[in-house]
């Protein structure tokens, strides 16, 4: 009897050791869970409050979508001057999603209050909630465009794994023309140029809308602040016409350009202060 108990005990201990070994090896192979960095995001408070509480922000959004509507109306008149083949192509509007047609400021506010850096875990969790509200004026414009027979493509750098949640959210707040084809998310590259070109093969893109200049053209990508200024000045005739920009002071390529311009080893908060223009 004692020998049986000994063998049973020995077997349980051995099993535990083996099990622990394989769990440890498996964890090591997969890599430890990514730690979310805690950061001081207080500098974003004013920008986030502006988006959530400023009537001026709402006015700017309504103004943007009003001009988008005017652009479609003008295109109906001026398209008669286009070559016949181009005139017959179906029209399309290409819009970004985040901070262009959907408001993610609650997710930004959550990161500020909890001192969290941007991370995919929280970003995916926010998307799965399907709670983002529509940007003021966006739904009305999208429905107007569809009544005019214009296709709408929602081109975003949300990851492909977020597609169903994104489709559900867009539908829930009233956006039209929502389908697997029309909601175009990121699969590999961050640049949207290949996706825009793919749409342009079948449609005549009348308007490009976004809160980031990269939503409009690849000429603005990975540029310094000065080069972005110069590119905008060169394209100024397009703004308020084919290019329409929504305000977003919370984040964007404009901020990345500041960090890119400062080649020193200083932290980003110092780089932001150093970038200020003084009297």
Image (cartoon, helix red, strand yellow):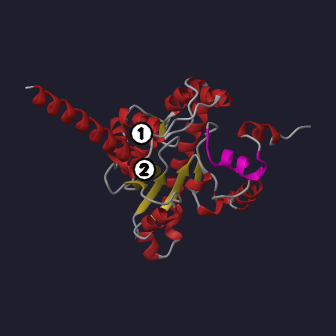
Residue wearing tag 1 = 124
Q: Where residue 238 appears, x then y in whole percent?
A: 64, 58
**Residue found 79% across the figure and 37% down from its top:** 273
Q: Position of residue 166 (x, y in %)?
A: 37, 43
Element class at badge 2: strand
Q: Is residue 177 left or right of residue 273?
A: left
Tell whether label 2 touches label 1 (CB within 8 Å). Answer: yes
Residue 176 can be seen, yes or no: no
Judged left or right of residue 70, residue 269 is right
Query: What residue sits 51% from the left and 48% below the top?
Result: 69
Q: What secondary structure do most residues of the magenta stretch adopt?
A: helix
Q: Which residues are magenta?
A: 251-265
Mark nearer the N terminus (1 vs 2): 1
Task: Say which quadrant the N terminus sits in.
Answer: top left
Mark 1 to mark 2: distance in Å? 9 Å
| Residue 2 is a magenta residue | no
Residue 125, placed above or below residue 54: below
Label 2: which residue? 159
């Amino acid at each position: 009897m004692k020998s049986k108990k000994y063998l049973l005990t020995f077997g349980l201990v051995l099993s535990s050791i083996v099990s622990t070994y394989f769990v440890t090896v498996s964890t090591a192979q997969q890599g430890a869970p990514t730690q979310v960095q805690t950061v001081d995001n207080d500098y974003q408070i004013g920008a986030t409050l502006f988006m959530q509480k400023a009537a001026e922000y709402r006015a700017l959004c309504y103004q943007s979508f009003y001009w988008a509507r005017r652009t479609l109306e003008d295109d109906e008149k001026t398209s008669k001057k286009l070559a016949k083949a181009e005139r017959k192509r179906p029209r399309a509007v290409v819009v970004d999603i985040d901070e262009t047609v959907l408001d993610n400021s609650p997710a930004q506010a959550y990161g500020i209050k909890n001192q969290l850096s941007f991370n995919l875990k929280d970003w995916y969790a926010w998307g799965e909630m399907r709670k983002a509200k529509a940007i003021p004026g966006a739904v009305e414009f999208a429905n107007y465009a569809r009544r005019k027979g214009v296709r709408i493509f929602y081109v975003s750098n949300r990851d492909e794994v977020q597609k169903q949640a994104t489709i559900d959210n867009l539908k829930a707040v009233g956006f039209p023309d929502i389908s697997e084809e029309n909601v175009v998310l990121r699969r590999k590259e961050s640049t949207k140029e290949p996706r825009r070109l793919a749409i342009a093969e079948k449609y005549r893109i009348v308007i490009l809308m976004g809160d980031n200049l990269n939503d409009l053209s690849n000429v603005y990508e990975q540029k310094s602040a000065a080069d972005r200024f110069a590119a905008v000045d060169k394209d100024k005739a397009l703004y308020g016409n084919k290019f329409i920009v929504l305000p977003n002071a919370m984040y964007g390529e404009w901020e990345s350009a500041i960090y890119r311009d400062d080649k020193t080893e200083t932290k980003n908060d110092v780089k932001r202060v150093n970038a200020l223009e003084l009297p």
